[in-house]
Amino acid sequence: MAETNLRIWSALETTSPSATKGFQRAGGFKGTAIKPIYTSLKMTETFGPCGIGWGVSTPTYELVKGDDGSVAVYCTVTLWFRDPETGQRSDPIPGVGGDFAIAKRSSGLFADDEAYKKAFTDAIGNAQKLIGMSADVHMGRFDDAKYVNDLKREEAAEAREEPPRQELRRETAARTHEQTGGMVDRIRTGEPPPSGEWEPPRRPAEVELPRGADGKMDMKLWLTRLMLAISRCERQGEPAEWLKLNGPPILALKENAPTQHKRLLDYAATVEREVSNPMAA
């Protein structure tokens, strides 16, 4: 039972040393800060794209004035995730964060135009703590140099075993070519589709489920069309928009054809990397 209860916690608790940074506050307090984008990456690796496998509510803010002229801003959000094994969506998980919108310094009052963003990030991080995110940092294990050095050695060993990025890209491209009969390749090189072939809309949209000659839903053709649409993405976050707008059939694909479902998510992630970092393509 303990292993079942800690399944998600265990997936999130270990933190990469490269995603941390030491800090020291006034008064001598020292600690370890975690890069917020890293925790978003861990959530996406574990649950799927933000908005599909996990997400946060619209934040609410409250301003509290101090007697010295300072103004604190507090942010409240709720976090949710979808269990990767059961597909069940979690209950809302609350998180509260804060920062100073106007801080009192020795030189006078200072306004921080990023205070709302900092409070929002803090609130998300506090909600993520409740499901185990970077628990090793919060439990003080990063104060142990041996623990951190062991993590660094493990990461270095894993990096040596990973195939080069270009090889992974070639393998993904080959699988996609096989799955779509070369249609994705033609679109990505700018070649127009032959007469009679489906052409995706220019903006993310719901891909209609086609029917075969027998009148039944043709999931294979639908999957080909969705991958074709994703292949045309040109801006960051666009692949995730296609996945979000086609959520119900994607969930059905996961339940009935998990291998094809994984290939779809892998391909969307590959396209996202390409549009986010075109120099690595």
Image (cartoon, helix red, strand yellow):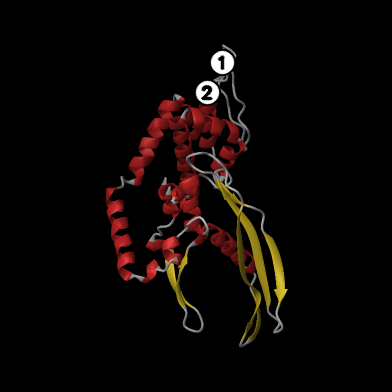
Residue 155 vertical placement versus 223 (above, below): below
Amino acid type, label 2: Leu
Amino acid type, label 1: Gly
Residue 258 vertical placement versus 56 (above, below): above
Q: Is residue 191 visible?
A: no
Picture residue at 50% right of the left edge, 23% below the top: 220
**Mark 2, other Cα within 10 Å: few <14 / some 14–19 / many ≥20:** some
Picture residue at 52% right of the left edge, 28% below the top: 223
Residue 85 vertical placement versus 253 (above, below): below
Q: Quadrant of residue 153?
A: bottom left
* Viewer-closest of 184 and 73: 73
Position of 23 compared to 107: left or right?
left
Picture residue at 50% right of the left edge, 79% below the top: 25
Residue linked to disc 1: 212
Residue linked to disc 2: 221
Residue 104 vertical placement versus 262 (above, below): below
Q: Quadrant of residue 215?
A: top right
For the C terminus, the quadrant is top left
Q: Position of residue 32 (x, y in %)?
A: 44, 70
Residue 73: assigned label: none
Q: Position of residue 69 (x, y in %)?
A: 71, 82
Q: Position of residue 31 (x, y in %)?
A: 45, 73
